[in-house]
Amino acid sequence: MLRFSKLIFVLSAFVCAFVALERSGESAKNDNQYEKLELIAKVLHLVETNYVEDVDSKELIYGAIKGMLQPLDPHTNFLTPELFKDMKVETTGKFGGIGIEITTNKKGDLTIVSPIEDTPAFKAGLKPRDQIISIDGKYTKDMPLVEAVKMMRGKPGTAVKIQIMRDGWDRPRDFKITRAIIKIQSIKFKVIEPGYGYLKISTFQETTAKEAEKAIREMIAASKEAGFKGLILDMRNNPGGLLNQAEQIADLFLEEGVIVSTVSRNERNKEIRYAHKNGTFSDFPVVVIVNGASASASEIVAGALKDQGRALVIGTQTFGKGSVQTVIELDGETGLKLTVAKYYTPNGISIQGNGIKPDVIVEQMDPELLKKAKSPWFPREKDLPGHIVGEGETPDEEEMMREEMEPKEKEDKKGEKEKEDELKEPPPFGDLATDYQLQQALSHLKAWDTFKKLIKKDEKVSAKKVEEAAQSKK
């Protein structure tokens, strides 16, 4: 009976974690919950005393709790002592593993949200929306996320075998990936063209906002001669991270107004985060790039800047992970990761399931196709025999480039015996030649600069006309 009492005590402590979150006058409902708890304890007691073999009471309790959470969303999980310890290292930016963010779809399939840039998974060619069929031979159907994460983590230098299924493949493929210490570099930046900055955020961790602010100031300082004309904020394949860092990133570009709202089941428990004027970069335009692997914290930033009219968002619709999790310590060594609220953009749009729809839809192009893409050739005046040479006429740069590329294209065609679905390296960081979405982002910034000049010119012309009209009346 001592063990039976212990089981009731532990399960009571677990239920109290829920009750503590609920205290809103639902005493009758809570009493009913305790009655159901007796049924669980009775089953545990029967198994412990009558099962054909000895059982571990702790494993029975853990299994019961996992079963209780199974019908809920994939982000709600029971954390065993080992998993609870691992959870504490997720946002420090350094851990051992392969470097992917995962979720489960409605069918219970383990799915990659995004491989983290410069990690073993990223280099191996894993992609967003890839389905993980098995990990080291163990099938992942309906496997809790925390368990899948635990299986993929391990000692650096050891290998994990992952079976992947991808759209367009007729059968799964095996990937053997060597684990490494994952030191995430959340910020990369460069002046992509004179006056235009490019800031890529891979994830939101403890120092992301400070690093981003420093990066922007460095790009502005490097653009003194040309003048800083605009910024591209790239959050593609960004799986999220710390909420406060997302808020601080959005606050860098907003002087006032709502950044994000979190609303729990009781709508009276609404928390609103606002922007502050101090330290805001408000004197240059911003274009944000997102895609289907932009999730959670990155969606908060994109949604805030879009709704507040501070940035143009381009790319493809985001992932739609707009739920808030909290981790509750249960007994000193185990924990409960529980979904407690949803995120809403400044315009009151729920991110959960919907994602952020860009202002301008821009699909990404295959880097290899983009390299080979070229406009059709049209004859010009300078191509006509005997044409009059114009003052300052220069050789046709487009034709010279075409002639240079032709031998290379012939060589490429000779070696083109690759399979159509062969994994290719992702485009290099900030490479305009191979990144179509980045090209379009820069084009929109340049167009804004041109339109701004046209508006100023039009305002001067209008002012002059008003002045002339006033003079004529005299």
Image (cartoon, helix red, strand yellow):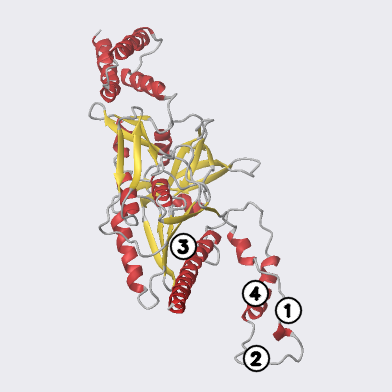
Residue at label 1?
379
First along the sequence among labels 4 and 3: 4
Question: Residue at horizontal 48%, vertical 37%?
Answer: 353
| Residue 228 image offset from top left, x and y in percent | 38, 70
Say if mark 2 contacts mark 1, CB within 8 Å: no
Q: Which mark is residue 390?
A: 2
Tag nearer the camera, 4 or 2: 2
Labelled disc at residue 429: 3
Residue beneath disc 4: 405
> Circle 1 sits in a helix, a strand or a loop, which is it?
loop
Residue found farthest to the right: 385
Mark 4 or mark 1, which is nearer the start of the sequence? 1
Query: Horizontal and vertical percent for residue 1?
Result: 25, 7
- Asked whether, in this view, residue 454 is left or right of residue 421, the answer is left
Q: Amino acid at mark 4?
A: Met
Mark 2 or mark 1, whichever is nearer to me: 2
Q: Which mark is residue 307?
A: none
Which amino acid is tagged 2?
Gly
Answer left or right for 127 relative to 347: right
Note whether 284 is above or below 181 in the view shown. below
